[in-house]
């Protein structure tokens, strides 16, 4: 993917004395008192901001936070807690600017945080007048917010159309490189793990991947629907019986290419959905009518782990069981450990996947951990993300 990279502009001295506008993703969780409870996204944004400061730029940074009503400021929508945390991480004061679309006073070597961009009327609808106004504030626009790359909004798309220069920040560039490595030019075999509660939410992803991957591992409620398609009993497990035909089509598409969708040979069941429900391992052919399938069994886990250890590239989205309950976490743990032990290039994304990676402490053993939930899924679907599209257009002149 051909885009201008902000790091290159900085190395060439082109950011010196320039006004740099960075669209970051600082949308962090907060408690009822407004305190930040988890600051990964803020920490991830620091390298781009520091790069701009080191290059001698006048730096403006903005982000959305929560779901504010456009044009109606409420204290809980403010980026003030983010400005404070960013200041601590950068070791300097980070001033917060409100009502900034008409002009920002910022000097080279200084950084200012522009108040929640979704408070501006026209942000979400990518209003052209707003986009042009924001583009007039800057010499170099930098998109470093992969988590919003699937949305065409004024600060993710419109400003990139009209700014003198539009480029990708280091976080966005890393996502582009990882996605290209995993999907556009993968080392084979390419194994994808797609798990979750519903086939319907992942159907387009499954169809898209089935044309490209060598093994398509399905897990969670999705696997139950595929078990139905294979003629196996699933008891009272979560599944979508009306999508059995679609599941069969994915299995056939894979088979036609000499590839496979491995169906579980054993499962872990319980009579109720609770952390303390007794767990029973049984063959996939012997699931009772009152059983809930809550994990893959040890035999299935070992078969899948063996495939992952031999993979060239692994794409992982979703745990294969109810990993939040320890009795039903062994399948997801086996998958996670196999990915960690594999020499394959691995890319993982999605909130539950990141939680599983954290639970088993394998962050350093995953090739690339994607920061964008919805954006990561849309890439897997084969969609062109608006933020990538406009940066490519600008790079092509």
Image (cartoon, grey):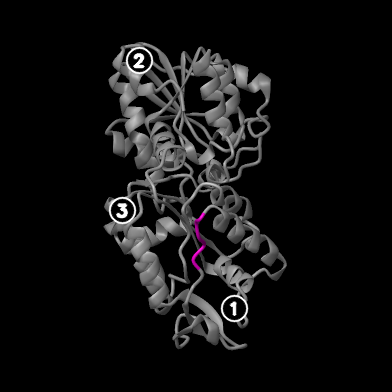
Residue at (56, 46) in percent of width and height: 66
Residue at (40, 39) in percent of width and height: 181
Q: Position of residue 387 (x, y in %)?
A: 54, 30
Point out the tag, 1 or 2, that comes first from the N-terminus.
Answer: 2
Label 1, label 2: how far apart the Cα atoms are: 66 Å
Q: Secondary structure at mark 3?
A: helix
Read off the residue under disc 3.
363
Read off the residue under disc 2.
108
Looking at the image, residue 217 lies above or below residue 364: below
Looking at the picture, tell me which residue is in the foreground, 280 or 82.
280
Please name the predominant secondary structure of the magenta segment in the image: loop
Q: Secondary structure at mark 2?
A: loop
Mark 2 neighbour class, 10 Å CA radius: few under 14, some 14 to 19, many 20 or more: some
Mark 3 neighbour class, 10 Å CA radius: few under 14, some 14 to 19, many 20 or more: some
Q: Secondary structure at mark 1?
A: loop
Q: What segment is highlighted magenta in the picture?
A: 258-262
Task: Determine the image quadrant of residue 68.
Answer: top right
Q: Position of residue 45 (x, y in %)?
A: 38, 36
Q: How many marks?
A: 3
Label 1, label 3: how far apart the Cα atoms are: 35 Å
Read off the residue under disc 1.
232
Looking at the image, residue 357 lies above or below residue 265: above
Residue at (55, 13) in percent of width and height: 136
Looking at the picture, tell me which residue is in the foreground, 116 or 170.
170
Can see residue 329?
A: no
Residue at (31, 12) in percent of width and height: 13
Task: Determine the image quadrant of residue 356.
Answer: bottom left
96 lies left or right of 251: left
Looking at the picture, tell me which residue is in the foreground, 203 or 172.
203
Q: Is residue 261 magenta?
A: yes
């Amino acid at each position: 993917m051909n885009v201008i990279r902000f790091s290159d502009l900085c190395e060439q001295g082109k950011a010196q004395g320039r006004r740099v506008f960075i669209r970051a993703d600082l949308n962090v969780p907060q408690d009822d008192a407004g305190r930040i409870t988890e600051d990964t996204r803020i920490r991830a944004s620091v390298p781009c901001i520091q790069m701009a400061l080191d290059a001698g730029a006048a730096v403006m940074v903005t982000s959305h936070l929560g779901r504010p009503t456009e044009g109606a400021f409420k204290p809980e929508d403010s980026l003030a807690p983010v400005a404070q945390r960013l200041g601590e991480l950068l070791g300097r004061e980070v001033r917060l600017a409100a009502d900034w679309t008409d002009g920002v006073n910022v000097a080279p070597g200084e950084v200012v945080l522009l108040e929640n961009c979704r408070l501006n009327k026209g942000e979400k609808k990518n209003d052209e007048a707003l986009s042009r106004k924001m583009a007039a504030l800057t010499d170099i626009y930098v998109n470093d917010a992969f988590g919003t790359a699937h949305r065409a909004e004024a600060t993710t798309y419109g400003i990139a159309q009209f700014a003198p220069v539009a480029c990708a920040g280091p976080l966005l560039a890393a996502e582009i490189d990882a996605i290209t490595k995993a999907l556009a030019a993968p080392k084979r075999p390419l194994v994808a793990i797609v798990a979750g509660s519903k086939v319907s939410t992942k159907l387009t992803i499954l169809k898209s991947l089935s044309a490209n991957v060598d093994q398509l591992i399905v897990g969670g409620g999705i696997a139950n629907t595929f078990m139905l398609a294979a003629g196996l009993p699933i008891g009272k497990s979560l599944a979508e019986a009306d999508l059995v035909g679609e599941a069969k089509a994915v299995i056939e598409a894979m088979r036609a290419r000499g590839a496979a969708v491995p169906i579980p040979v054993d499962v872990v069941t319980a009579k109720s959905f609770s952390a303390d429900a007794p767990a029973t391992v049984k063959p996939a052919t012997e699931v009772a009518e009152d059983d809930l399938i809550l994990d893959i069994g040890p035999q299935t886990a070992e078969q899948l782990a063996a495939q992952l250890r031999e993979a060239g590239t692994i794409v992982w989205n979703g745990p294969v069981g109810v990993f939040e309950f320890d009795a039903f976490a062994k399948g997801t743990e086996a998958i996670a450990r196999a990915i960690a032990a594999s020499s394959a290039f691995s890319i993982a994304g999605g909130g539950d996947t990141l939680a599983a990676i954290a639970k088993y402490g394998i962050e350093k053993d995953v090739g690339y951990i994607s920061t964008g939930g919805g954006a990561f899924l849309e890439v897997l679907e084969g969609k062109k993300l608006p933020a990538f599209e406009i940066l490519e257009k600008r790079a092509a002149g």
